[in-house]
Amino acid sequence: FSIWLRFGGGKGFATFLGILLAIGWPVGVAAAVTWLLVAAIFRYSSLASLSAAALAPVWLLVLHQSSEPKLWLTVAMAVLIFARHHQNIRRLLAGDEPRIGAPKATAA
């Protein structure tokens, strides 16, 4: 809920990534790499964010960065990312989500 975006959407995943880097930098790096790979392959920023958020708790466990509070925090943040991306999920399922680098749709 960025003040710069009039408390609208955007920047949530960046905040999530920053918190991951703070609580366990290897997890933050793994989430960032996940985002980059999914974005490069599928060219959907929202899909990349959702994928990285879903895998963040897994990366926390795999990279042995886990403690119970960190795990619950990461799961809670991932759930929040999914909740805030509900419109993006609908557009992805409908095939209407804009791809990275695609020209912006203009109003007629």
Image (spheres, rainbow, N blue to C red):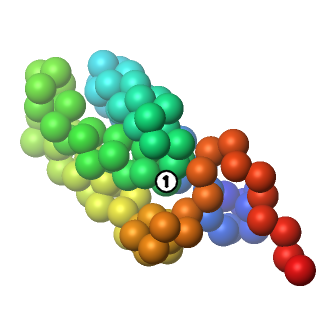
Q: Position of residue 8 (x, y in %)?
A: 66, 68
Q: Of the residues shown, which amino acid type is indicated by label 1?
A: Ser
Secondary structure of residue under mark 1: helix
Question: Can you say which quadrant of the picture contains the C terminus?
Answer: bottom right
**Horizontal side of residue 80 vs 44, given as left or right:** left
Q: Position of residue 57 (x, y in %)?
A: 20, 41
Give the x, y percent position of residue 82: 36, 63
Residue situated in front as seen by the camera: 78 or 73: 78
Residue that appears at 32% across and 25% down: 30
Looking at the image, is 89 positioned above or below residue 59?
A: below
Residue 35's place in the image compared with 99, above or below, is above
Q: Position of residue 50 (x, y in %)?
A: 38, 52
Q: Is residue 23 visible?
A: yes
Would residue 9 be found to the left or right of residue 74 on screen?
A: right
**Could you tell me which quadrant the N terminus lies in?**
bottom right
Q: To which residue does mark 1 refer?
A: 46
